[in-house]
Amino acid sequence: MPTPPPSPASPAGPAATVTPAMRQYLDAKQQYRDAILFFRMGDFYEMFYEDALVASRALELTLTSRSKDGQGTSIPMCGIPHHAADTYLARLVKKGFRVAVCDQVEDPKKAKGIVKREIVRVVSPGTLTDSQHLDAREPAFLLSLSPSRVPTPESQDADQAVVGVALLDLTTGEFSCAEYAGKAGLQALADEVMVLRPREIVAPIDLDLSRLLPEGTAERLPVTRVDAWTFDHESARRRLLDQFRTNGLEGFGLEAHPSAVSAAGALLHYLRDTQKADLAHVSSITYKTSADCLLIDAVTLKHLEIVESMEGGRDGTLLHELDRTVTPMAGRLLRAWLLRPLVSLERIRDRLDAVEEFAFRSTDRGKFREVLKSVQDLERLVARAALGNASPRDLVGLKQSIAAVPKVRLLLEGCQAPLTRSLLSALDDLMDVRDDIDRSVIDEPGAVVREGGYIRDGLDAELDGLRRISRSGKQVIAELEERERQRTGISSLKVRYNRVFGYYIEISKSNLHAVPPDYHRKQTIAGGERFITPALKEYEEKVVGADERILEREIELFEQLRGRVAAE
């Protein structure tokens, strides 16, 4: 996994001096020395020192320099627009880098002194959640390894090995764990890693992976090393109890599997530390045994072309021939079923009974498929809400997907297969969540939270009042323009606005002789001059102030809504 050389903790030398902002940068970099640091400065994320050298090459950015450090050396620098950060971040992660995002956590206009900044998340190959950069029909697993005994080069006693493994898909909340013991267990673990191909492996800093995984695996997959204490059993157990809000792990089948608990707890710690979130969508864990499904090794899967052809890709595989699913969740589930077929005769019969019933109910099946076409990737939408990344468009997609639940229940109420009846009885219409989103967000919002314009009128009295000021203020300015044209006799007079000067009156050169004495010159331009008046300045302060507060209030309301959705 490529890793940027660590940037210096501080400029060298006794006479070294740095600006307050650069001191913030260096302190943040010290926390995650193995990650490229995106440091928010105004409308850009900046990178400095070695990070700038690495990122400029990886992203093909122009490398510039900042004012000299305490030793008189220019500091390498490159930057990206903050609104395009996700695209650049995904490009770095796909190349195997980790990226720490250091954002402004207070309003620059209200800050006393330097703006406060903090690391808000760390993104790595296994924690990338942006749906635009993920395959919707494949999982994005992180895998952690917690060995209680590993064969050493001296003993080579593989029969004594016990390894706990945890597997979590941050984009959906799917969480499972297992233990592998003895020589056969290590071979099964190797097969599991080759089949599932996790996007990232989390392991103790002192673990020799070559003793557990097939040769070259550690080089092909990104490996993140963490402190060994992270895997302490008691600490890991407490994290799981806290995450699932329970007093014991018996209900998950974990109490007799300390190595699995250690791996699962360590993985939770890693994700909480890097995502700065409570992972509300990770609400359960499954302990898997060899009796649950048939373990097919990677070589057999490849030769049989189950999910990937000999040439690579899905074309011509069994999955390609069978997959007629209409939702991303179903596509991922079918893929998982093919990789690990059932071995329990009772579960196989239940599934076949349900399939047979759908085969004969062709009309209902067709209607069911049509309803499902309106369902988006619910698992990943819920995860984005829990991680605080969901956009207004994501929540509307969630609302539309939830709306399909009553229709599904109605269509399938005549089904008698036990598996179908069991699934239907577990469905929750989530009317309160759907109504909350519908009441709060317009039907066709944008995808960017900071652009505003997505909260409905009538939801919040303060927001409605600000919008009235903004709308009436703009109307007054339009009326002022017409009034000034009549007063001055200048038909080409225009009232305009920009961020630098605010509102101003623009007069062409040929009409400057008609400018009234109460106009105050603001700026000379090529085609004429710009002026302001006391009345125009008064309305500018009223309108611009309202527009800024409107955006702030919309963001506040949306974040509250996103929090309520995540809690569900």
Image (spheres, rainbow, N blue to C red):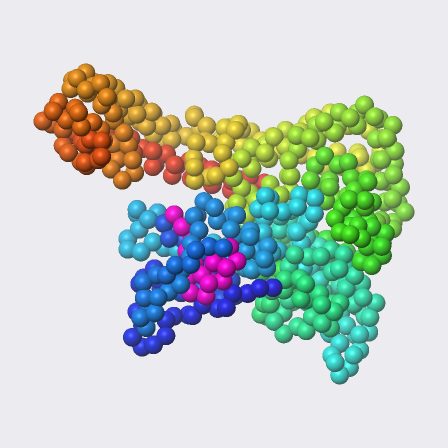
Q: Which residues are magenta?
A: 43-59
Residue 494 seen anywhere in this rendered image of the structure: yes
Q: Residue furthest bottom?
A: 154
Rendering coords of residue 166 (x, y %):
69, 59
Q: How many marks?
A: 0
Q: Does 172 appear above or below 32?
A: above
> Which quadrant of the figure contains the C terminus?
top right
Q: Residue at x 79, y 42 (%)?
A: 320
Residue 351, quarter of picture:
top right
Q: Residue at x 25, y 26 (%)?
A: 495
Q: Does 474 appear above or below 161?
A: above
Rendering coords of residue 114 (x, y %):
31, 56
Residue 278 seen anywhere in this rendered image of the structure: no
Q: Residue at x 51, y 51 (%)?
A: 88
Rendering coords of residue 567 (x, y %):
56, 43
Q: Residue furthest left?
A: 517
Q: Residue at x 52, y 52 (%)?
A: 89
Identify the main secondary structure in magenta: helix
Residue 215, quarter of picture:
bottom right
> Which quadrant of the figure contains the N terminus?
bottom right
Q: Is 473 covered by the magenta stretch?
A: no
Front residue of 77 and 30? 77
Q: Is 58 covered by the magenta stretch?
A: yes
Q: Does 568 appear above or below 539?
A: below
Rendering coords of residue 210 (x, y %):
71, 72
Front residue of 152 and 26? 26
